[in-house]
Amino acid sequence: MRVVRSLDLKKRCGPRLSPSNQSCSFVVVRVKGGKMPQYEDMEVLVLVKAAPVMTSELEERMCVAGVRIDGGRNEWVRLHPVPFRDLADDSRFAKYQRITVRCIRHKTDRRPETWTPVHGSIVVGETISPVKGWERRRPYIDRLDEMTMCDLIERNRGGSGPGVPSLAIVRPAERPDVLVDRRDADQLKQWQARADAAAASPSLFDDPASAKPPFEVVPWRFRYSYRCATPTCSGHKQTIVDWEVVSLWRRVRQQRNWEDAMRTKFEQQMWTGKDSVLFVGNMEQHPWNFLVLGIFWPPAGPTQTMLL
């Protein structure tokens, strides 16, 4: 692997990880009460950044998912919660960027891929640039199993737990349609009240010298409607939570035909002549309900792959 820059993780999140490491780095810390939480250092190629949400505790959080690549691994990992807009500039990361991070198992989330990142432990590495980016990204995607959405829902009906996948790749049977709906007025009112309360109560991690823009509530819900590869599939309608869909809406919302601009991107550009698949993940409290976390849309046809 080509190393972009030297990173001293010992000061921030433990021993340096590299692709040549064939085992994980564990640190055991004794805390009050005799409990011994186990921390794990991992290297992740970020595939998904969901749009931030404002929790009922007035904390702005987002979900990040990617493929874990340290120690020869190629498996899904979910980092949650991530206070992305509260991260230091040198800890902010993009899609398809390598990060190293110290994590602990989530206290209550039973989904097997979920880890909680330790605050201040994220160190960013190389980004797979758009130049020949699909060729360099694809080896990691190809090693993750594809599943049908119908099978995923069925396997999660009994609840989350070991051996029950909550993150997956799904290949629609045909190009999905984009549905745009205005959110429920009561829901929007509740979310706006949270945003206003959070603005009046700065976070512990807020830097008074550099105020961040206020949290914006998006009044629209964007969904994909599609059938998966299961022969008896009757169709799925799932909310797209990819940060990219919100970012595009903010750029085009002043246009008279902004919905057409959204469909051009998420129906046409991402699917016509592409070998596209969906990154999907379920909801912690309702594990049979899945969301579209992102879209991987390389050109159709044979692609020569190369490792980083």
Image (cartoon, helix red, strand yellow):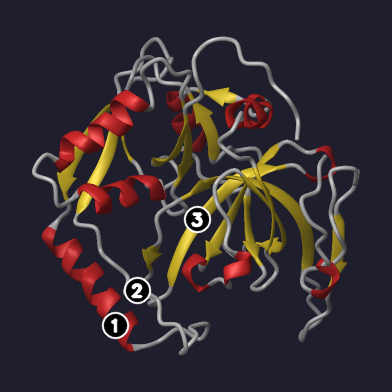
What residue lies at 81% left-to-right and 42% top-to-bottom?
2
Mark identifier at residue 197: 1
Q: Which amino acid does label 3 sit on?
A: Cys
Q: How far apart are marks 1 and 2 (CA)?
A: 14 Å
What residue lies at 48% left-to-right and 83% top-to-bottom?
206
Residue 154, position in %: x, y? 46, 30
Q: Which amino acid does label 1 sit on?
A: Ala
Between 19 and 196, which is closer to the camera in this rendering? 19
Residue 222, position in %: x, y? 26, 42
| Residue 104 location, quadrant | bottom right
Which residue has dot 3 on it?
Answer: 63
Seen in the picture, residue 167 relative to 191 is either above or below; the reply is above
Mark 2 element type? loop
Mark 1 element type? helix
Q: Distance between the residues labelled 3 and 2?
A: 20 Å
Seen in the picture, residue 6 relative to 236 is either above or below; the reply is below
**Which circle, 3 or 2, is nearer the viewer?**
2
Which residue has dot 2 on it?
Answer: 213
Query: Quick check: 265 left or right of 86?
Result: left
